[in-house]
Image (cartoon, coloured by chain):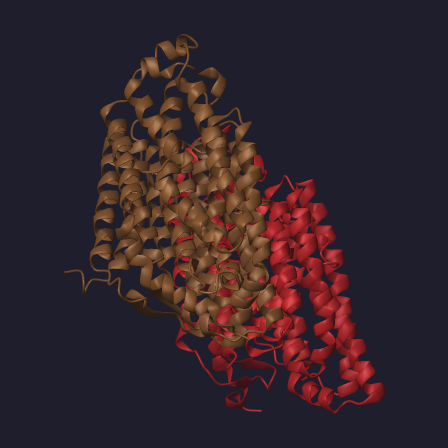
Amino acid sequence: MTLESLNIAIALPEIFLLVMACLILVVDVYLPAEKRNLTYVLTQFSLIVALALLLSNQTDTRILAFNDLFVQDAMADVLKLFIVIISFGVFVYSREYLQARNIFKGEFYVLGLFSIVGMMLMVSANNLLMLYLGLELLSLCLYALVAFNRDNGNASEAAMKYFVLGAIASGMLLYGMSILYGLSGSLMLSEIAQAVTKAEGAQNIGMIFALVFIVVALAFKLGAVPFHMWMPDVYHGSPTAVTALIGTAPKLAGFAMIMRLLVEALGGLQADWQQMIIVLTVLSLAVGNIIAIAQSNIKRMLAYSTISHVGFILLGILAGTAEGYSSAMFYTISYAMMSLGGFGVIMLMARQGFEADNISDLKGLNQRSPWFAFIMMILMLSMAGVPPTVGFWAKLAVLTAVVDVDLVWMAVIAVFFSIIGIFYYLRIIKVMYFDDAVDTQPLECGRDMQIALSTNGLAILALGLYPAALMSLCVSVFS
Amino acid sequence: MFADLPLLSIVVWLPILGGIAVLLAGDKGDANGVRVLSLVVSIATFVLSLGLYSGFDSSTSAMQFVEQHAWIPAFDINYHFGVDGFSMPLIILTTFTTILVVLAGWEVIKKKPSQYFAAFLIMEGLMVAVFAALDAIFFYVFWEAMLVPMFILIGVWGGERRVYATIKFFIYTFIGSVFMLVALIYMYYKGGSFAILDLHMMKLTLDEQILIFLAFLMAFAVKVPMWPVHTWLPDAHVEAPTGGSVILAAIMLKIGGYGFIRFSMPITPDASHSLDWLIILMSLVAVVYIGFVALVQRDMKKLVAYSSIAHMGFVTLGLFVVFQIWENPANASGGGAALAVEGAMIQMISHGFISGAMFLMIGVLYDRMHTREINAYGGVVHTMPIFAAFAVFFSMANAGLPGTSGFVGEFMVIIASFQANFWYAFLGALTLILGAAYTLWMVKRVFYGEIANEGVRALKDINSREFAIMSILALAVLILGLWPAPVVDVMHATVENFLQHIAVSKL
């Protein structure tokens, strides 16, 4: 094997991030606490360079590397781009939050970078083993991050739950993968796909058996009902900075994992997984939207809202067409941006000794800061799917995709539950605009956060006014 | 002179950008700057929108001032504006009413005036866009977006139970409209286009038409609002600030009626035909039953809100009675259909003026006394004679006195209903009695009699600003009542074409 056949260049962003993560790990050890900012700057610098590397190396064909373990295609390019951008945003938002809580430590950034590498590997996996390793790299970092604020009881509880349930899900995934390997004799996605189309009789049943485990594992990782139990607790228990990390970019990686496993490898079993996903979708939409109404903690509410959004993403995927996949991707990207902004606002409101994670803490935000109340309003409207925000177009695209495959009743169910969902988003707007402020301390935050949060909110609005560019990007990926 | 300008875009975006400018001006300095800027923007928009009237060619039913650009190629959604005889008068009504609303909030609004005025300006642009949009999704975007400023307006500047009212308002309207969205997507999937004029031409089976019609009905019936989905309106009206009530009654309800004209009837003519009994029934219930409900109200705003529902019943009655007019064997010529539709349109415009005036009137009293209870007043004519004169005039118009615009539309619809069925006309005509009863009884209790209390004794008559608003509206009501021809003329060709279109089965 020569170095050329490894085709190392296409994995340059991942390699670079990995090296930087190791470097930061070492540098951080020798930094005195007051110079910890350097770790932050280095982390953001590596993300920017990774972004530049990604941008300079876009492709519209499929390129394989590392003995076909690693693939670069248009989908991977787009998803990685957004993973890096969104993670950059998470780090900007969380800096002051971490400082105020005395957990501004190097580990946050190192683990964060490793999890980003994990996500990027998942996105580019062309082999079951690669996919699994990427997933574990991501998950293990996140488990540790949830417990990052180690003196906090809630956080430890959340980490424990997350770890145990995550480990079960990984076990399920491995079990499904091992059956697939046994039946097809390969870990390569393309070879499995061939084996699936050739499978007949008992072998086909075996494949479906494996599929069940894989779908369950995917549902666990994405948080689709009835495998969603961990989400509210983890979202609630983690420090908000970590919640933001869990609740945004990993959804993009999760989307890629579904695409790689269900569509690329098990596309031949589409009729089978479509039915399973229909059940997951309806349940997620129902449970997510209804239970969110009862939440008084905004992070829990956002967790349930995530569950309902996962329902919408699955809705696009179950259509099983190129339009469906591109609409689900559009949805995932817009969702990641909205939820990034949502957690950003929570971190903006939080200060030393005060988490601002109750819905009532948002009371009278319009009096305290009209601008950020406006940003939060855009985010909530977008999550609710009210035009002119990007959330509306995401829902429209997904609904169009399911109507296209004659599943009008699924579209009706989806809009029915989104009506229920609108109530709790409106309640946030109500609290911000109609209630009087209880807490009158001025909001204080750095210029960087203000700019990032404003850009974030305005991007949601701008993409709502002109969604064509992002939409055609997503469409081009699957054409 | 307007030929080369994208006039519709300007009328849509000028108030929206103006609203953003007002927002950015903020409440740091003197509120006067914000008010003046808002007034200038709204007047400029109105003047520009008059260009739509002067440049309008009333001999054709084709869309005019058309602008079309690709917006989202992936779904073939276009930035597509254009007006015909239905939408042009409603656009001018919108721009006209916004000026009054800005004036009405002048010194009354103390809390965050910049946000208040900005919300109205942004809403103005969005509502004009709803009337002008010729792409279904483009329409839907504005249709939903305009809920947001209204939601904020009621919620922030509203009365006691504002939160309940505004959430009810938003959710009711939202429920109706999402099903319309599914219907639009379904038609896109069938026909491959979101252009409204393409949807008009699209073939659909009767079953499809009925489902699509019902989906549209959910959206538009809530907006009009028709009995039995009207319950959000009294709440929203009572809690909304005066300006919000005016816009709600004068423009937003019209968007429901406009939706029937632009979507339901042309896209699903056969379903409209086979379900016309349902709409006529709902309209007559609104006219008669809601008229009685209005009679027993103790809150002036609630009374006017119910009277709005009853008056809007005429709009839907006039639109859907045309099928029965054609079917009536005693009326072989089929005459009267155009009268019904034109009557419905005139009724919409006239109701825009009159209900706006009624709510402004109540606002004038409320600003002084901070109560809307009828019982709290009495003998206002002794302390506010000029105001009382206006109030009596508008109340007469609301009751449908000949010579005012309130009479014209109702009369046209009643006459046309006779061509369909005597009982429709009979029940519809009851409104002339009921309307007179509840409106005039309210006038009697509020304005006449002895001075009821010290509060009324201390009242000061309207100032020049209020006088200006009232006299402009009074003039509009009189002109439309005595000489409705200009408005009828601009829509005539469009109405004829509309009737021809819905007379042809799509099956």
User: In the rendered view, would you say B380 is above or below B313?
Assistant: above
Query: Measured from the top left, where is residue B410 in percent x and y?
Result: 42, 44
The answer to whether any part of residue A287 appears in the image is: yes
- Quadrant containing the N terminus of chain B is bottom left
Question: Looking at the colours in the rendered structure, which chain would you say is drawn in red?
Answer: A
The answer to whether any part of residue A354 appears in the image is: no
What residue is rendered at 52% in x and 41% in y? B287
Residue at the far right in the pictured view: A202
Residue B138: image quadrant is: bottom left
Question: Looking at the colours in the rendered structure, which chain would you say is drawn in brown?
Answer: B
Residue at the far left in the pictured view: B1
Q: Nearer the viewer, residue B389 or B412?
A: B412
What residue is rendered at 77% in x and 71% in y? A213
Query: Measured from the top left, where is residue B303 in percent x and y?
Result: 49, 31
Query: Measured from the top left, where is residue B393 in percent x and y?
Result: 33, 29
Q: Nearer the viewer, residue B323 or B299?
A: B323
What residue is rendered at 71% in x and 89% in y? A197
